[in-house]
Image: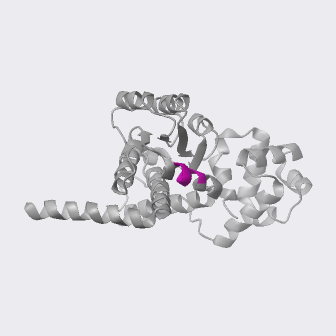
């Protein structure tokens, strides 16, 4: 039960000024917050009690008590070292440290906000799917192709096209027993949104992998999955967010593989044998 501080950071740009006052106080004084009542937090933060309730809703928690439990869990884990930005002419040593730290932090923060019930639902529908279509543009397309490779190796027919028009064309061909997975950090990639809309029109199940908070793709999907990664300035090239997306794909892939473990192992061994045979011919 954690992820309260991560959720506050992720929804920062989406909340009202009054909610921001409350959020800022919690981020600045998390140890004190878990000891306060709603009235006390309102008085100390300068935000209204109604703003606290709205903030809880914006965070996706059931109420103030759950918010405090999640913040308390963050304090106990002690894993938050924060994201770090590289600087002009930084040393290689610093860059190695910053990049590695940011990637690790992104995965840790994502684990804190993953909804286990929705992850289970996603694994279930992917396991039952006749075909799986992965949609993503730019760096998210790299994640989509990685997902296709993984699922194909355990005999789950999958597609991930790099060309955006071909993605949309394939979405039109989807059927009710297929699954569409839309991948977009922002959740606002027009072509990915269009693909999920076409998939839903066909009756196919839909899954999204986007940043935490309110966004179009997450609101559209039957099963929204969220990642955490603060993409700033030079890191806007989707570095840490790509790692978080890949981690979610790995979880989904291994979850599906575990549903039919013996069969998955058999197909993995077959693919390894085929690749080994080809390498020996060279």
Residue 200, x across and y down, in percent: 55, 32
Quadrant into which the C terminus falls: bottom left
Query: In the image shown, does 132 or 188 lie closer to the viewer?
Result: 132
Residue 243 against residue 178 in the figure, above or below: below
- Find the magenta span and give its range: 121-125
Asked whether the viewer can see residue 94, the reply is no
Residue 138, x across and y down, in percent: 38, 39
The residue sitting at 34% across, 56% down in the picture is 153
260 to the left or right of 217: left
Residue 252, x across and y down, in percent: 49, 56
The image quarter containing residue 132 is top left
Asked whether the viewer can see residue 254, the reply is yes
Residue most extreme to the left: 282
Magenta highlight: main SS: helix
Query: In the image shown, does 144 or 65 lie closer to the viewer?
Result: 144
Q: Is residue 55 magenta?
A: no
Count of picture labels: 0
Quadrant into which the N terminus falls: bottom right
Residue 130 against residue 25 in the figure, above or below: above
The residue sitting at 38% across, 45% down in the picture is 158
């Amino acid at each position: 039960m954690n992820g309260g501080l991560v959720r506050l950071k992720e929804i920062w740009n989406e909340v009202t000024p009054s909610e921001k006052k409350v959020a800022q106080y919690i981020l600045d004084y998390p140890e004190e917050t878990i000891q306060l009542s709603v009235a006390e937090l309102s008085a100390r933060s300068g935000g209204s009690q109604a703003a606290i309730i709205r903030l809880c809703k914006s965070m996706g928690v059931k109420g103030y008590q759950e918010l405090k439990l999640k913040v308390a869990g963050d304090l106990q884990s002690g894993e938050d070292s924060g994201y770090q930005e590289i600087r002009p002419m930084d040393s290689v040593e610093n860059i190695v440290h910053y990049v590695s730290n940011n990637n690790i932090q992104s995965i840790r923060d994502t684990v804190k906000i993953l909804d286990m019930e929705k992850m289970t639902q996603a694994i279930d529908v992917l396991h039952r799917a006749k075909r799986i279509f992965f949609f993503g543009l730019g760096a998210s397309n790299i994640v989509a192709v990685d997902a296709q490779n993984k699922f194909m190796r355990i005999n789950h027919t999958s597609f991930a096209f790099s060309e955006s028009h071909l993605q949309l064309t394939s979405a039109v061909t989807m059927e009710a027993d297929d699954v569409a997975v839309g991948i977009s950090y922002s959740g606002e990639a027009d072509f990915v949104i269009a693909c999920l809309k076409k998939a839903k029109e066909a009756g196919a199940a839909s899954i999204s992998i986007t940043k935490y908070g309110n966004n179009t793709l997450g609101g559209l999907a039957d099963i929204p999955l969220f990642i955490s990664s603060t993409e700033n300035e030079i890191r806007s090239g989707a570095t840490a967010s790509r790692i978080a997306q890949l981690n979610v794909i790995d979880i989904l892939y291994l979850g599906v593989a575990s549903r039919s473990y013996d069969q998955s192992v058999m197909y993995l061994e077959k693919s390894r044998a085929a690749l080994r045979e080809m390498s020996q011919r060279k």
